Image: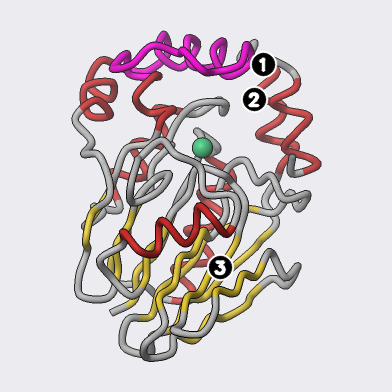
Amino acid sequence: MRYLILTDIHANLEALDACLDDARARRFDATLVLGDLVGYGPDPNAVIERVQSLKPIAIVRGNHDKVACGLEQAEGFNAVAKSAAHWTFEVMTPEYRDWLAALPEGPHEVDDLVEICHGSPFDEDAYIFDELDAVRALKVSGRPLCLFGHTHYPVTFQLSAEALDSFGPSGAAESHVRMQPGVKYLINPGSVGQPRDGDPRAAYAIVDVDRRCVELLRLKYPVEETQAKVIAAGLPEVLAQRLAVGR
Ligand code: ZN
């Protein structure tokens, strides 16, 4: 079984399509989605349509999904995120708003190996940045591999009886985490549609359950096309600029 892992797509259709083309060439059997399908980007309806067509076997909501569909207020959002959330609410079809509003809260245990969440397994909206957050998450997680998103920053934490280790983005187009027995893993594959690690390439992952291997992938997509759509939609210009620098 090979799972395609998508998180923080943020209505970026060009980045999503690039990931899907790449993933199809590598083959996958089922899709897991870790939330924030919309918000910031110019294509909320098309992105939801694409995700629905993948028939994910597990999906959890993100904080932007909750605000964009009207389930929660934009408290805690900065001015740019707030304005993008309002724009998204206006352009989304009522059917897609309802569909987003019905997405379940994480965490969700997918099988004996994998659990998914948006922010963390102890709070769907909490950010995992440092090792303190990671240890708390690893202790709460009920599976050997917990996949998360929300920070848009690719990172692997691994906890053995001896130590906690962490590995940031390698810069490689492809890197593999081979899971060892007795070690717990907490992995953020990075954001499909709005990377924030200084690398503008789209990020996603494939989990090979039988080989117990997580394939972390980065790939270029036509950023200029997405930027032009952001501007044409009247979304804040900074949302176009940040895509080119991955911040
Ligand atoms: Zn996000």
In the image, which residues are magenta? 68-93
Q: Of marks 3 and 1, which one's residue comes earlier in the chain?
A: 3
Residue 159 among those drawn in magenta: no
Left or right: residue 173 compared with residue 203: right
Residue 179 is situated, as x and y percent measured from the top left of the image, at: 44, 85
Category of crowding for the residue at label 3, using alpha-carbon neighbours closer than 10 angstroms: few (below 14), some (14–19), many (at least 20)? some
Q: Nearer the viewer, mark 2 or mark 3?
A: 3
**Mark 2: which secondary structure?**
helix
Depth order, front residue of 202/72: 72
Precedes in sequence: disc 2 or disc 3:
3
Are the two marked residues, 1 and 2, in contact with CB atoms closer than 8 angstroms? yes
Q: Which residue is mark 2?
A: 229
Residue 88: x and y, percent?
Answer: 46, 17
Q: Is residue 137 above or below residue 66?
A: below
In the shown orientation, is residue 173 left or right of residue 64? right
The amino acid on which the numbered mark 3 sits, given as a three-letter code, is Thr
Separation of marks 3 and 1 at Cα, in angstroms: 37 Å
* 3D distance between C-alphas at marks 2 and 3: 33 Å
Q: Which image quadrant is residue 77 in? A: top right
In space, the residues marked 1 and 2 are separated at their CA atoms by 5 Å
* Residue 80 shown left or right of residue 133 in the figure: right
Residue placed most toward the observer, 220 or 116: 116
Q: Position of residue 40 (x, y in %)?
A: 57, 26
Quickly name the residue at label 3: 156
Q: Amino acid at mark 2?
A: Lys
